[in-house]
Image (cartoon, rainbow, N blue to C red):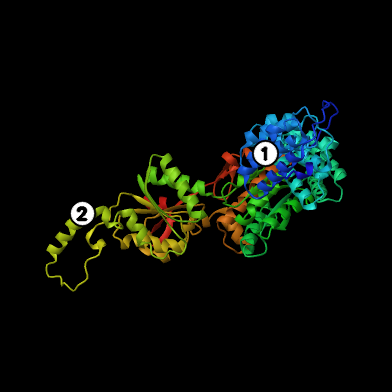
Amino acid sequence: MRTLLVSLLTAITCCVSCSATLPTKREPRKASAQSIQELKAAEASAKAGDTKKATARLKKIIQQNPDSDVGDDAHFMLGNIQYGQGLYTDALANYRAVADSEYASPIENDAKIRAARSYLRLSKPDDAEKIVTGPWREPTPEQATEIERVRAETFLAQKKSVQAIEALVALADKTESTSEKEKIREQALELLDSRLSEDDLREVSGNSKFGFMRAPAKYRYALVLADQRDYSRARSALADVIDLAPQSELSERATRLIAQIDARNRVDARTIGVSLPLSGEQAATGQRALRAIQLGLGVYGPKQSNFRLAVVDSEGTADGGRRAIERLVQEDNVIAIIGGLTSKSATAEAAKAQEMGVPTIVLSQKAGITKAGDAIFRNALTSQMQMQQLADVAIKNLGLKRFAIVYPNDAYGVEYANLFWDEIKARGGEVVGAQTYDADTKDFSPQVQRLTGTFYLEDRSSEYQQRLRVYQEKNPKRSSRTSAPSVEDILPPLVDFDAVFIPETAVGVGQIVPAFAYNNVRGVRFLGTNAWNSDAIVRRAGKAVEGSVFIDSVLTTDPAFRSSEFYTSFKGTFDEEPGRNEIQAFDSAVILRQLIGSGETTRVGLQSRLASLQNAPGALGKISAAGEREFRRPTTILTVSGGKIVPLVSIQK
């Protein structure tokens, strides 16, 4: 009769414990021929999709055959129909009727599997666990696979990750399909990566019942130890990975990490690593930064030293940056690194340097770069530094209180707009309006008009009608064939802001700022980023940017800068004029030279000294480490006066 059973559900995904402690059951009564025919009819109705008729017939069979084998079959089939209809409580009752019956049934294991799944559907994983961890009749291979599958599902629902991994390992052993085995393995690996604690990792990696998951668990455990700076135990764990999974991709990764750990113990205190883009589109920038580092470290120039530079081309890419850091640590044994000049490579270089435990000074302005870890420092004029100083100058020095923002809808514009807004608010100022635009925008009048209340006529319709009458009275001889006056001719702009912040390059500024004058907005001050520190701003925007204010590290045309020791040394050594990037690279080298020259010979010690850096000498003034390991450096407040970019202080004296 068991061949009549139809599985109306598709198997879901889950390990098995068999026991001889199950009670002995009585044999059921033999079903009558009529009952068998009724069961066949119910099956046919179910196949035809008439579950209502099938349900009625099955309930009748159960009522008339409570102690026969056909009664168990009817319970099981009815449970399947109800499960498919989402009636999990009813389905559970029918499955339990088979599993808990005093009569023996060859489908007892199937009923228990379905009962466990019903409990899971009812969000009762603890009840499901009682079934899947209890004793079972000797299962068939197919049943054993399903038991493991539902065990895994149960432990996953309970967030018992170690038990779930054990069940998944057993399930993979019982699964013949290669693709299915790989799916199970990926599921187990995801659990290992996201849910296991240090103790869990140790348990999984140390017990043979976890099979193919031991090596990944041991590798993950080694990474935890490395993060804790317990490199000796981390190395031992990585060696175990190689033994557990020889000639595997995981073994290769473990071998590379062992090399990195070994490299930590080999440090040449007089060798500084440099990772810069020396090829590709940023090659010229990288070469100039390298020359500044050589000058600061004393490789070239008037103040030479016995320091050695190890230089690797980062190619300005993430992969190239990672490879550069690995080579500098493993092959050159550098005590520290200067690099991360481009935004494309900086994050990857910082992450790899943190992983390898080498203190690194990053030169990129990219946001959040020092979050990679405590070995990463930054020596650059960041967006936050600029906005803090710009807000200070605008509110405290210039007395501005109300601000508008016009910004591009890209990562750069959004970052600066948000930072400026936050800094203004923190100082008691107010942002009264903000307008964004797309990269391909050419006409900025709509943005200006929205800020000044001349874009939406309906908002000022009464005022418009009144001013239009006055206009017509003053112009009685205007020909009827002459076009009507524009809105701008009638309504004056409502300017309720003292200044406008525009995070843009010279091209954008040259289009945006004149749009304010064109729309009769006058008497406001324009504020910008260090991207404004270019003669192209004046060429493109002309008189419209007179009196604007922005922040940068240096004004390269400033006589004070041109007479500085750094400028004269760089120009005299390389016959080139240095700029912002060269200053930052030079200062980074000088800082490392000073700290190592004072006796620091270990990476850990150097990292500590960098974190507590105060008033270190730089090309333009003192440099100190602040929160998040950002170096605070001197800045210059700039403005446009008489068609030239000059320090703001020079016109305030």
State the SS at label 2: helix
Looking at the rendering, which quadrant does residue 131 occupy?
top right
Q: Which residue is mark 2?
A: 463
Q: Residues within 10 Å of mark 1 (few under 14, many from 20)?
A: many
Q: Please identify the residue farthest to the bottom as the structure is shown.
A: 481
Label of residue 58 in the image: 1
Residue drawn at (38%, 52%), measured in percent from left and top? Answer: 500
Label of residue 68 in the image: none
Residue drawn at (70%, 47%), measured in percent from left and top? Answer: 353
Q: Is residue 433 left or right of residue 470?
A: right
- The answer to whether marks 2 and 1 mark residues whose Cβ atoms lie closer than 8 Å is no
Of 527 and 24, nearer the camera is 24
Q: Is residue 578 left or right of residue 421?
A: right
Indicate the position of residue 405 as horizontal and vertical percent values: 40, 52
Screen quadrant of the N terminus: top right
Looking at the rendering, which quadrant does residue 435 occupy?
bottom left
- Residue type at tag 2: Glu
Work out how far the residue at label 2 is from the one at label 1, CA to CA, in angstroms.
81 Å
Indicate the position of residue 613 as horizontal and vertical percent values: 61, 39
Of 318 and 612, nearer the camera is 318
Of 298 and 219, nearer the camera is 219
Q: Is residue 230 visible?
A: no
Number of labelled discs? 2
Does label 2 or label 1 sit earlier along the sequence? 1
- Residue type at tag 1: Leu
Indicate the position of residue 368 as horizontal and vertical percent values: 58, 46
Q: Residues within 10 Å of mark 2 (few under 14, many from 20)?
A: few
Looking at the rendering, which quadrant does residue 466 occupy?
bottom left
- Please tell me whether mark 2 or mark 1 is closer to you in this view: 1
Q: Is residue 23 visible?
A: yes
State the SS at label 1: helix
Indicate the position of residue 460 as horizontal and vertical percent values: 24, 53
